[in-house]
Amino acid sequence: MALRALARRAPPPRVATRARLVDPADGAPLDDALVLWFPGPASFTGEDVAEFHLHGSRAAIDGVLAALAALPGLRLARPGEFARRAFDAGKLDLAEVEALADLIAAETRAQARQALAQLGGALGARIEGLRDRTMRLLAQAEAEIDFPDEGDAPQGAIGAMRPGVDALAADIAALLDDGRRGEILREGFSVAILGPPNAGKSSLLNRLAGRDAAIVSEIAGTTRDTIEVRLDLGGWPVVLWDTAGLRALDAADPQAVLEREGMRRTRARADAADLKLIVLDARDPVPSGELAELARDGLVVLNKADLAPGAAGLAVSALTGSGIEALEARLSDIVAARLRGDASDAPILTRARHREALAEALAALARARALDVAELVGEELRACARALGRIVGRTGVEDVLDVLFGEFCIGK
C-alpha cells in the first residue's frame, strides 16, 4: 500500500503518527510528516484511506505527489472524487454532499453553521421520513388494487388514506414555507443600493466594503452597470449591489442611451433584491417620483451628513465614516431577522432543486387527494416518492451529480 511504501510502516488505525517519508524509488527523504490510516469500511469513502499531513513547502508537496504517482495503480483524484465515492458507498446522501460543498465554500459563520447542520443529516432524515410515509400510503393503495374484495384491504381504503395524504402534504408545505432562508443564506442576502445620481451610492459602497470597489466621481451618472461586493456583516453574508442613479430623462435625448440602459438594470436589481437601500443626499432628504415608491418597503439612508449637520433619520457620511457603524448594525439586524428563523432547529432547504422537488411532490399529493381510483392514486404517490427521493439521491439525480462534484476542489 502507498502508506507502507513511503512511511515504511502502517500506523495504528485512526491514530496520527509521526513518520519520515522517503521516495520508494531511491530512499531519498521527502518530509517529516504526520500520517493516518483509516481502514474501510470505517472511513470517509468506505475504502482504505491514508492521509499524509505535510509541511507546506512546494518541494515537500511536489516530492510526495511525484512519489505517489510513480506507484502502480495510483493517480491524482478528480475534483470531488472522494465525495463521489462516499456518496456511491452510501456514506453520504446527496443533501449531505451538497452541504459539504457549501461548508468548503462558506464565507461567514452563519453559512458554516447551516452547512454543518445539513452535513449532520438533518434534511436527509426529514426527507427520508416523508418518503417513508409516502411509501406506506402507496402500500395501502397497492393493497386496494391487489385485494379489492379481501379483508386485507378494507372497503373505502382510498377514502381512509386521505387524512394521511393531507397530513403528509401539510408537512411538505411547512417545509416549503421557510421564506427561502436557506437559499438566501447560502447565496448571500442581496442589498440593492438605490438613489438619485450623485447621492454618494458608490462612495457608500466603498466605505462598507473597506476598499475602492466602485469608481467615484462628482459627475452624475458615472455608474452605468451594477457593481457587486460581498460582505460579512456580523457573521451574515451580504451582497451589495451598487446601481446607476434613478432620475427623469429626456426621451428625445440621444446621449442618454447608456444611462437609460443603466437605469433599466437598476430597476431589475431592485426587483430581485432582498432589501432596497435608498441613499439620499442629506441636504435633500425627501425621495420623489420612482424613488418615493421604492422607499416604501426599503431602508432610507441620508448620506453626506457632514454637509447637513442635524439631519434626522439614519444619517451617515461616506466621506468621514460618521454613522457607518450604526448603518452596519441596522443592516445586520435586518439580515438576522430574515435569516435566523425560529428556535425549532428544523432543517431548511438550501438549493433550488430541493424546493422544486418538494413542490413537485406536493402537486402529486394534491392530484392523489382528488382521485378515487386506486391505480391512479398509486401512480401519484409514486411520483411523490420519486420527487422526494431525488433530494437525497435515491432516484433520477445523474444529471445533477457531475455538476455537483465538479464544484469541489481537486480530490475532495
Image (tube, rainbow, N blue to C red):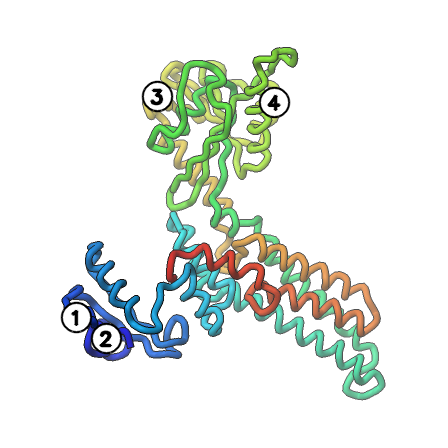
Residue 202, how many percent across, how many down?
43, 25
For label 4, the SS is helix
User: Considering only order in the chain, which callout, 4 or 3, is on the residue closer to the N terminus?
Assistant: 4
For label 1, the SS is loop
| Cα distance in 3D space between marks 2 and 3 | 62 Å
Residue to which mark 2 is pinned: 5
Disc 4 marks which amino acid?
Glu
Query: Which residue is rendered at x = 23% and y = 71% of the image?
Result: 16
User: Considering only order in the chain, which callout, 1 or 4, is on the residue closer to the N terminus?
Assistant: 1
User: Considering only order in the chain, which callout, 3 or 1, is on the residue closer to the N terminus?
Assistant: 1
379 sits to left or right of 280: right
Disc 3 marks which amino acid?
Leu
Number of the front mark, 2 or 3: 2
Q: How many numbered discs?
A: 4
- In this rendered view, identify the residue nearer to me: 343 or 159: 159
The quarter of the displayed image where residue 270 is located: top right
Mark 1–mark 3 CB contact (< 8 Å): no
Disc 2 marks which amino acid?
Ala
User: Considering only order in the chain, which callout, 3 or 2, is on the residue closer to the N terminus?
Assistant: 2
| Cα distance in 3D space between marks 2 and 4 | 71 Å
| Cα distance in 3D space between marks 3 and 4 | 26 Å
Residue 406, how many percent across, how many down?
46, 56
For label 3, the SS is loop
Residue to which mark 4 is pinned: 290
Query: Which residue is rendered at x = 51% and y = 45% of the image?
Result: 338
Residue to which mark 3 is pinned: 319
| Cα distance in 3D space between marks 1 and 2 | 11 Å
84 sits to left or right of 168: left
369 sits to left or right of 295: right
Q: Is residue 234 above or below residue 386?
A: above
- In this rendered view, identify the residue nearer to me: 338 or 134: 134
Q: Is residue 367 above or below residue 312?
A: below
